[in-house]
Amino acid sequence: MRDIEKEIGDKLCEIEQKENVKVIYAVESGSRAWGVESPDSDYDVRFIYVRNREDYLRLEEHRDVIEWQLDDVLDINGWDLKKTLIQFHKGNATLFEWANSPIVYKITDEWKEIYNIGKKYFSKKSALYHYYGTANSTYMQYLQNDEVKYKKYVYALRPLLACKYIEDNHSIPPVRFEELVKQNIPAELSEEIKRMLCIKAESNEKVLNPRLPVIQRYIEDELVRYKQISKAMADDRTEEWEALNKVFLRLVENCV
């Protein structure tokens, strides 16, 4: 039997050696992190890395991402430290999801220090706008026909439920889909989601199934609502850079 976790660990070591970087954080993202994977779901591995000090001082710039592997089983790519800190400043919702993934392949003290600072840059408006945009894009592209992939219902529902969590709790939403569904949502919707997930868990991701009116209606109504809310919400991003600059300089100074 294939030991995926060991294989991922080996891949991270290979990346460090061949790219001359240090991986300081690596997690699962996507459906497996959300707890709604299908039998044929791949592994979406995301990592944060630091280059050596000399690389950060060179005039020519390195790419700030490493795209390592993409096949039917593994999707592995990572962000450079500098890119990561800039994205924290922007309140990047995807980065906050990585930071709170329940499936962690590697974590270091450096990353703990970074996230202790980075989490203070969470922006409700940035996150809400991101999740609304993700749900709307999924709805427009994949949920217009009489038959749909139930995977796409998850890809629309999850961000809308994240919007609800942000609206109600004013904080970073959970990564796990089951935690988001525990919110105060209509009982009819909750039951339909459970039924949909049971079908999805036993099906190939490419299988088409009939649209589910209760879920479809909820998505359509919430898209209208969160479009208005995201536009009206005040910009709450943190303008200050000093804390991020300090942690960047401290980590780079300690690089070999």
Image: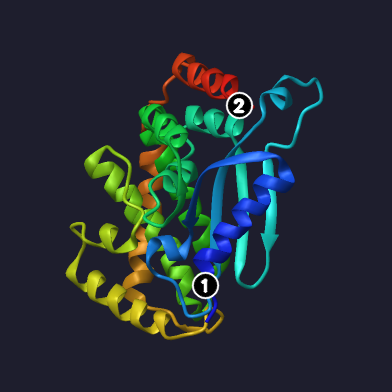
Please state which of residues 199 and 10 is positioned toward the viewer in this rendering: 10
Q: Residue at x 75, y 33 (%)?
A: 62
For the residues labelled 1 and 2, the Cα–Cα distance comes to: 32 Å
Q: Does 176 appear above or below 256?
A: below
- Report if the CB atoms under discs 1 and 2 are less than 8 Å apart: no
The quadrant holding residue 36 is bottom left
Kind of residue at badge 1: Asp
- The numbered mark at residue 223 is none
- How many numbered tags mark residues here? 2
Label 2 SS: loop
Q: Does 44 appear above or below 106?
A: below
Q: Residues within 10 Å of mark 2 (few under 14, many from 20)?
A: some
Identify the residue under disc 2.
Answer: 255
* Percent position of residue 96, x then y: 43, 42
* Percent position of residue 183, x then y: 21, 57
Please state which of residues 246 and 255 is positioned toward the viewer in this rendering: 255
From the viewer's perspective, is 83 left or right of 109?
Answer: right
Q: Does 65 appear above or below 199?
A: above
Q: Residue at x 50, y 70 (%)?
A: 143
Identify the residue under disc 1.
Answer: 3
* Percent position of residue 4, x then y: 53, 69
Kind of residue at badge 2: Cys
